[in-house]
Amino acid sequence: MKPPVLRCRHVTKRYGKFTALKDLSLEVYEGEIFALLGPNGAGKSTLIHCITGLAKRSEGSIEVLGFDTVNDFRTTRRLVGLVPQEIGYDPFFTPLESLMIQMGLMGVEPNRSRAESLLETFALGDKRDAYTRTLSGGMKRRLLVAKALVHDPRLLFLDEPTSGVDVELRRELWQEVEDLRTAGTTIVLTTHYIEEAEKLADRIGILHKGELLLVESRESLLERHGGRPLEDIYLELIRKADGRHAA
Amino acid sequence: MSTIALKTLFLKEVRRFSKVWLQTILSPLVTTSLYFLVFGVALGSRLREISGVPYIQFVVPGLVMMTMIRDSFLNTSSSLFQSKINGTITDILVAPIGALEMVLAYVGAAMIRAIIVGTLVCLVALSFTWFPLHHMGWTLFFTIFVTATLALLGMIVALWAQKFDHLAIFPNFVLLPLAFLGGVFYSIDLLPEPWHTVSRLNPLLYMVNGLRFGFLGVADVSPVTSAGVVLVSFLVVLVAASALLRSGYNLRT
């Protein structure tokens, strides 16, 4: 197995008295697509925020390619890309300007041809000079993916990238995720769509109430459960965990 | 420190206010020009002299400073707060950018806007009256440190604010009254006690009078005292803004 790109050790995140992540340990390996499944409020986004710097972990350590995400934040943030769950856009700038700005913010010299190439890749070439606020929801989401890639991250987080997206765009995004993996990018994906994880993921983690219930390769998980649909396996695990919590 | 990130964030902020120049450059210029017309030209013809200079000249540095105070504050506060609200602050928070780059970029851009508007106000004033530039050094000192101080204060308020109402509190209920009571339109020597002494507690008095000394060579307070107050104010907000950014206050959960 290749060395871990991401290593989380005993990570705990508290918001006041509420514990969003409980002593979570996880490794993600180079070149894989790792799908993090879990119901709303399970802690998926919190974990991603702790890794990318949007949230401060309460305990534990997080390393990206051996660099601590707090002490070596300048190094780790150059290595990581994030497609956030919420669609945020700057109304003052066009998609081309947004990408050029994001390159600079990530510490890469802004490069117009690279920005134009990304816009073409994500079918936004003809919208490069339009105000971002005039783009459709799907276009804005594609722009978010392009922004996350401006600095060629080694590790890309996609936080529910297909949430509220139509079937056609979802399939396009899946293809783009596959292409990125082929190009060598390690991908961590959170999703509500079990079908998405079943189609894309090499390994699957199930997070529930801040605890990691399971981490296993997709093939082994399906084989171990006699080829049952992943959705059934997921629901069974969540119900069992709920029963345990209730008890 | 990432110089590419610093340069990008600074230029982004400059382009942001340049794209809405009607609101960020022309609007304050028109407002201040109206003040100048009413207080300097219309009333000034009846008020003759204050501190040995014609009233119309007396109000010029005050109006320039009041404009620069407001614009430097508004530039950082509105930009940073809007980024928080529309979610684009994420672009900066996930980037390899530290508190130092954020402070330099936001404050630098705010200073540029304030100085552009301040210069334009001077040009408008010149079309009504001649005024001297008594001391270039003090003029530059107060321009640089006051705009930087207010830009830093704007960052602090933007970090603290949770809604647009919070953002409006400072310019409307703090800065504007303090600027009016800080000797923009009058000398505090005209005030009876205890208001003369109370006025000396207002930090904007020192900012206005510092620039007035730079322009006209007259002020209610010595430029050294004004410089001391401005420097202390600058250091206080610099330390506070840097500490808040480093801690991720209201930015990182």
Image (tube, coloured by chain):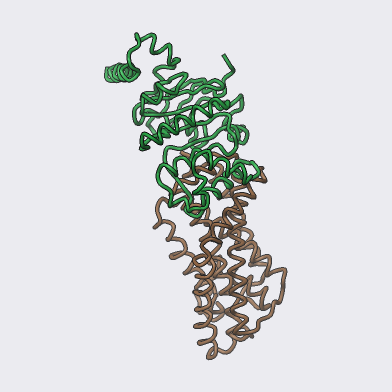
Whether residue A172 is situated above or below residue B42 in the rendered picture:
above
Chain corresponding to green in the figure: A
Whether residue A191 is situated above or below residue B133 in the rendered picture:
above
Chain corresponding to brown in the figure: B
Q: Nearer the viewer, residue B42 or B206?
A: B42
Q: Quadrant of residue B129?
A: bottom right
Q: Nearer the viewer, residue A171 or B77?
A: A171
Can you give x and y, in whole percent of width and height, for residue A66 in the image?
A: 61, 24
Give me the residue at 49% from left, 66% from top: B23
Q: Quadrant of residue A226?
A: top left
Give me the residue at 37% from left, 25% from top: A38
Q: Is residue B28 visible?
A: yes
Q: Quick one: quadrant of the N terminus of chain A?
A: top right
Query: Is A70 placed left or right of A10 in the picture?
Result: right
Q: Nearer the viewer, residue B8 or B93?
A: B8
Q: Quick one: quadrant of the C terminus of chain A?
A: top left
Query: Is A245 placed left or right of A198 in the picture?
Result: left
Q: Nearer the viewer, residue B40 or A78?
A: A78
Can you give x and y, in whole percent of width and height, for residue A19 in the image?
A: 39, 29
Can you give x and y, in whole percent of width and height, for residue A197 in the image?
A: 41, 23
Give me the residue at 56% from left, 21% from top: A30
